[in-house]
Image: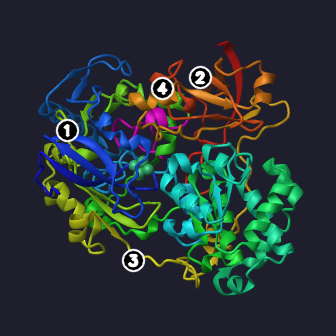
Amino acid sequence: MTNSVLENNAVVRGLCPHDCPDTCALLTTVENGRAVKVQGNPDHLHTQGVLCTKVSRYTERTYSPERLMHPLKRSGPKGAGKFVQVTWEKAIQDIAARLKAIASENPEAVLPYSYAGTMGWVQSEAMATRFFNKMGASQLDRTICASAGGEGLVYTLGGKFGMKTEFFSESKLIVIWGSNSITSNVHFWRRAQEAKRNGAKLICIDPRHSETAEKCHVHLPIRPGTDAALAFAIMRELVVNDWLDTDYIDKYTLGWAELRERAMTWTLDRAADVCGVDEDLIRALAKDWGTTSKAAIRLNYGMQRVKGGANAVRAIACLPALTGAWRDRAGGLLLSSSSNFKVNKKDLHRPDLLGERRPRTLNMTTIGNDLIHPGSPEWGPQVKALLVYNSNPVAIAPQSGKVVQGFAREDLFTVVMEHFQTDTADYADYVLPATTQLEHWDVQGSYGHTDVLLNRPAIAPVGQAKSNSEIFRLLAKAMGYTEACFSEDDLSMCRTAVGSDVDFQALLDVGFVSMPVPDAPFAEGGFATPSGRCEFVSDRLAAQGLDPLPDHIPNYEVPLAGHRFPLAMISPPARNFLNSSFVNVDSLREIEKEPLIEICSEDAAARGIATGDTVKVFNDRGEYHCKADVSKRARPGVVNGLGIWWRKMGLNGTNVNEVTSQLLTDLGRAPVFYDCQVEVALLKKA
Ligand code: SF4
């Protein structure tokens, strides 16, 4: 195994940094200085030697002929993708000069834009955050994926805690709620299959008849945004059938009387009407939940991308406490485990570099509106410079027509750090080639298990690529920032990130370390809420003037009779893509073929649409052209626009986010990608 010195022939331990709860341990085989194979580490409990198809092809991605090899400077109009090669020195000096000029007028006119393209603690928000803190730039509210559900957990359980993923294999009932686990959580799916072989019942709740739903015993194809209604109907059934664990409720929860009153209004027929599923299915689900010991819920983030997403998570997170499911390590719920990790943000991000300044915060979800905002005394200065890393906002942010309009501003100075010439890179003034995970150090926890992993560089940077942290180090130097933290190297930052909570030598020796987390975290209460109980009623929400109880909050956009846009649309990831990553890997794109919308046979017939036809998906925000797939994966009234294709690979240069909105969730200020009404019309027969 290599340490800081690269070896020509070696097997190097690493971790997968992509936005996935599994956070796999990687083994990269290097021959003559070139990575020839990337495999799962068989010694790592959660990886079990297996990677998903996407990352097992990582060498194809790393050595792709389309990989960015040199810094590039724009030579054509914004968005045209025309660039000339420049040296690193020129790029860094030019960028620093532009940023200095803008920041000297008002540093809040500079905005970072980043998310989970790389989730590592060092290559995401470490040197970058120090840099922007020193400058006093606007801060970014990183909400694009999980903050509604995260808030739901925080107000109910006290943090992003839950079952350990390994104990799902002992469960006797697994409710997979809002997740296509085969696609987005494959190592959990292996546990679920183990449980199934041992007699467990698997139930999937998802508007789409996904690959996962297909393999479960029962599928409830509920309408998008109706999950809380379903949870309340289950609660009512628990009450009327006396399936409650009253001892657990008395000792370890807060606010049952109030929650019970609300739940009792959710009769089976009311919930069936709202959710659009047969009431017998809801009754049977409630019975399974109320009468099975070792009952577990694997909740995932799809269901919280609607107006009431956080409330829905709150309602669902009450269910294990009502039946005392938490008493057993194979019972309870898992949405995210990320609060088990305490990143040493004080030393890694250096908030002290802000001094007395408190810059404004802009929400990454509303980047479309924010880039075209002219600025005002209340809002602050117009955004004049944008530094994008670990993200592809032109493809992934909602209402992309507005996003494109903002990125196309000739007076906006945009720098993009990337592996490939993405939709966003096309709008950059400078594109800087970034290293992939095989080429840099990093360290990271997980939101699906409780291990910290270390990533060693396996190969030298490809072409002239540099790590994100090295790019920000160079920019800091060119800006004249002299604090010692701007010279810290990546390996040292890995140590800084984990602080004293993790044995760093063990990370160096083995590659991963488990956090000391109890097997059944809430068996005897011990919730991380202010009361120490599972809070059905939240004083913290009441103090903000909000409803202290969870509720069913209908979507912003609901199908009304005679509405111009009668179909609800969800946009889950295509199986071989991860958000907009991997779309340009030829062998993966060949599997996905082309952008498509799944539509059920009756909705298709009503519009004269057959599989293979070219259709337009549209609403007042825009239109998206793709192929139709008349499929049992879509339920009546709901279409599935699989994502996230790069716009430039779309049939009319758009993707599914052309029609999504910039509205926000009830809590967490998150996007509502799955709260979107559209119409679908035939453009051309196959
Ligand atoms: S994307 Fe997920 S399943 Fe695939 S290798 Fe990475 S962590 Fe593992």
Give the residue at mark 1: 96
Q: Amino acid at mark 2?
A: Cys
Q: Which mark is residue 669?
A: none
- Identity of the residue drawn at 64% across and 56% down: 177
Separation of residues labelled 1 and 4 (CA atoms): 30 Å
Q: Which residues are magenta?
A: 375-398
Give the mark, 2 or 3, whose residue is nearer the N terminus: 3
Q: Is residue 280 above or below residue 399?
A: below
Residue hosting label 2: 626
Q: Which of the two discs, 1 and 3, labels the residue nearer the N terminus?
A: 1
Residue assigned mark 4: 647
Is 337 rendered above or below residue 637?
A: below
Give the number of marks: 4
Observer-nearest residue: 319 or 496? 319
Side of 435 relative to 559 (left or right): left
| Magenta run includes residue 71 | no
Q: Is 385 a magenta residue?
A: yes
Between the residue at mark 1 and the residue at mark 2, the CA separation in whole angstroms equals 41 Å
Q: Secondary structure at mark 2?
A: strand
Give the residue type at disc 3. Pro
Quarter of the figure that contains the N terminus: bottom left
Residue type at the position of mark 4: Arg
Q: Earlier in the sequence, mark 3 or mark 4?
A: 3
Foreground mark, 1 or 4, reads: 4
Q: Of discs 3 and 4, which sits in the foreground?
A: 3
